[in-house]
Image (tube, helix red, strand yellow):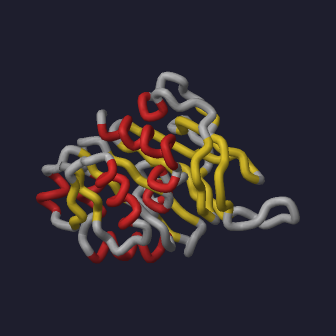
Amino acid sequence: MIAIIDYDAGNTRSVMNLLKRLRVPFELTDDLNKIQNSDKVILPGVGHAAAAMNRLKQKELIDPILKISQPFLGICVGMQLMYSFSEEGDTPCLGILPEQVKAFRPSPRFKVPHMGWNTNELINEDEFLFTGVDHAETYFVHSYYAEISPDAIATCDYETKFASAVRKDNFYGVQFHPEKSGRIGELIMKNFLSL
């Protein structure tokens, strides 16, 4: 069973719809036992980093998330929360990754938010999450980006290069929305689910 962490983040419904299409059993839950005993854990997210961290604190989910040993996938804000700090609301985050999340700076050529399809460039060709997916376009909607770190699996270029996918141990994160990225998104999600 897949546990989707319920912390009142936007876009949860789209992730649930993707799992339904893939015929994968899941539960939207904030129940600690269900999360700990699930096969995989997904932290979806569209929203503000500070509000998201506050909801995780209120639901007493921060320490349990940090102790997760099964495969974990953070999506969009869910990935950004994996970092130590976000400029969005000057927010201390989970600290799974030591780098920071920074704001895109608008310019005449680059509008904020970064919205639409863009290409992922793989850093680690052997990374299982992207098996069968190379230089694929995925769908992005975000105003903040994660710095490139040794844990980056893939990068994307929009005004600056940023980490579009990361992995540290059993913790995976994607800045794009696999649930809105068509066939490629489904393949990436299938790869995660088969870990």
Which residue is depicted at the point 31% across and 40% down? 193
Which residue is depicted at the point 45% across and 47% down? 173
Q: Nearer the viewer, residue 28 or 51?
A: 28
Asked if residue 84 shows in the view, the reply is no
- Single out the residue that lies furthest toward the top: 126
Q: Number of callouts in the render?
A: 0
Q: Nearer the viewer, residue 81 or 132?
A: 132
The answer to whether residue 163 is left or right of residue 106 is left
The answer to whether residue 159 is left or right of residue 184 is right
The answer to whether residue 113 is left or right of residue 2 is right
Residue 92 is situated, as x and y percent measured from the top left of the image, at: 47, 66
Residue 131 is situated, as x and y percent measured from the top left of the image, at: 46, 28
Q: Nearer the viewer, residue 124 or 184?
A: 184
The answer to whether residue 164 is left or right of residue 92 is right
Which residue is depicted at the point 41% across and 49% down? 96
Name the image quarter holding residue 170. Answer: top left
From what the image shows, is residue 61 above or below residue 162?
A: below
Residue 140 is situated, as x and y percent measured from the top left of the image, at: 59, 56
Name the image quarter holding residue 190. Answer: top left
From what the image shows, is residue 96 above or below residue 63?
A: above
Asked if residue 177 shows in the view, the reply is yes
From what the image shows, is residue 91 above or below residue 94?
A: below
Which residue is depicted at the point 70% across and 62% down? 104
Residue 54 is situated, as x and y percent measured from the top left of the image, at: 38, 75
